[in-house]
Image (cartoon, rainbow, N blue to C red):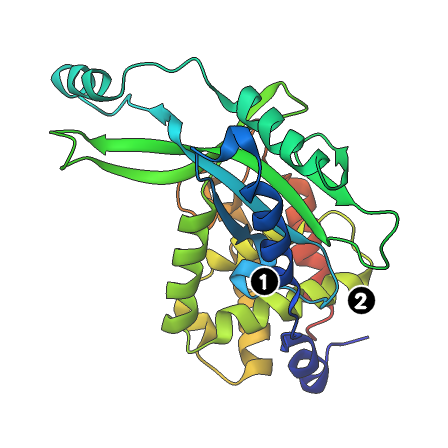
């Protein structure tokens, strides 16, 4: 089997879905009457493939974040000693953290739903209804990676999310930065970037390849230079795969789409270079 131009065009299409807004409305309604969350006003937003417009299934679960902005977790290692003193003078310390916030979010949902608790996310179930809330809901604190803190008004930081997997391992990610950088690349490639991300995700299903998570497919393709995308869709798809096949030695140095976190290595959220190499090989074999 060799991927045809028609297959690639079909695979590149984005399905239309109303699920994200439907789910956000339900979650906000459930949080609105929660006594312990009224003063906190958490932000609710979509992350993942729906937010990035790289989803390939109109009915797949929505990744939803319920994020608390204050208090937050931070990395101030890049700040000078005076800047760190200034930072802690303004923000100090709070006894309310991610564990307490997660429990308050879960408790607010329990008022209306059966709540399932996974290693990272909450799921909502209503056994008496014909519908379900098609979402993985992640309670998180805002994370700030500081570059400068000359004063409260002049602070400079990257915004991420902080949570713990299985209530143990701290995980930091940058979904808003991921979204912004992905949109910038899509504009600079005249829309080809996200088309090819969707096409490659569907090619993965066609190949029945299990070792390529959707998030890392998007990050992998983000590392391909913009020039490889500037062609007719079928040609651009093959150019992108060919670039990856010729540049496997660059895998270990690649970063996620947020530009901060390495894609590969020994950290908790890393992808395997062996799996990535095998996936690239499988794609290249079908590009003729």
Q: Which image quadrant: the N terminus? A: bottom right
The residue tagged 2 is 206
Sort mark 1 into few (<14), some (14-19) or many (20+) by Cα contacts within 10 Å: few
Residue 69 locus on image (x, y percent)? 39, 35
The residue tagged 1 is 21
Q: Are marks 2 and 1 in contact (CB under 8 Å)?
A: no
Residue in the picture at 73% in, 77% down? 3
Q: Who is closer to the viewer here, 187 or 287?
A: 187
* Quadrant housing residue 23: bottom right
Instruction: Say whether residue 59 is left or right of residue 244.
Output: right
Residue 101 locus on image (x, y percent)? 54, 26
Q: Which image quadrant: the C terminus? A: bottom right
Q: With respect to residue 124, does 110 lie above or below?
A: above
Q: Who is closer to the viewer here, 179 or 36?
A: 36
Identify the secondary structure beneath mark 2. Answer: helix
Query: Which badge, 2 or 1, is on the more N-terminal residue?
Result: 1
Residue in the picture at 32% in, 40% down? 158
Q: With respect to residue 288, does 137 lie above or below?
A: above
């Amino acid at each position: 089997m060799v991927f045809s131009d028609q297959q690639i065009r079909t695979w590149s299409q984005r399905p239309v879905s109303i699920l994200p807004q439907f789910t956000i409305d339900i979650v906000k309604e459930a949080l609105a009457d929660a006594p312990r969350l009224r003063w906190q006003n958490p932000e609710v937003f979509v992350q993942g493939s729906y937010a990035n417009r790289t989803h390939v299934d109109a009915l797949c679960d929505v990744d939803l974040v319920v994020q608390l902005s204050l208090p937050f977790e931070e990395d101030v290692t890049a700040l000078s000693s005076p800047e760190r003193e200034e930072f802690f003078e303004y923000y100090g310390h709070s006894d309310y953290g991610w564990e307490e916030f997660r429990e308050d979010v879960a408790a607010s949902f329990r008022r209306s739903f059966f709540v399932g608790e996974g290693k990272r996310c909450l799921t909502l179930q209503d056994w008496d209804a014909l519908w379900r809330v098609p979402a993985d809901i992640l309670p998180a604190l805002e994370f700030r990676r500081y570059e400068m803190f000359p004063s409260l008004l002049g602070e400079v930081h990257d915004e991420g999310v902080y949570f713990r997997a299985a209530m143990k391992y701290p995980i930091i990610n940058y979904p808003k930065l991921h979204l912004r950088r992905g949109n910038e690349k899509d504009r600079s490639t005249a829309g080809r970037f996200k088309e090819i991300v969707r096409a490659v995700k569907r090619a993965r299903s066609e190949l029945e390849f299990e070792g390529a998570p959707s998030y890392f497919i998007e990050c992998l393709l983000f590392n391909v230079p913009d020039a490889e995308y500037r062609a007719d869709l079928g040609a651009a798809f093959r150019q992108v795969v060919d670039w990856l096949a010729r540049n496997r030695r660059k895998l270990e140095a690649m970063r996620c789409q947020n530009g901060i976190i390495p894609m590969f290595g020994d950290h908790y959220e890393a992808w395997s270079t062996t799996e990535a190499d095998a996936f690239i090989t499988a794609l290249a074999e079908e590009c003729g």
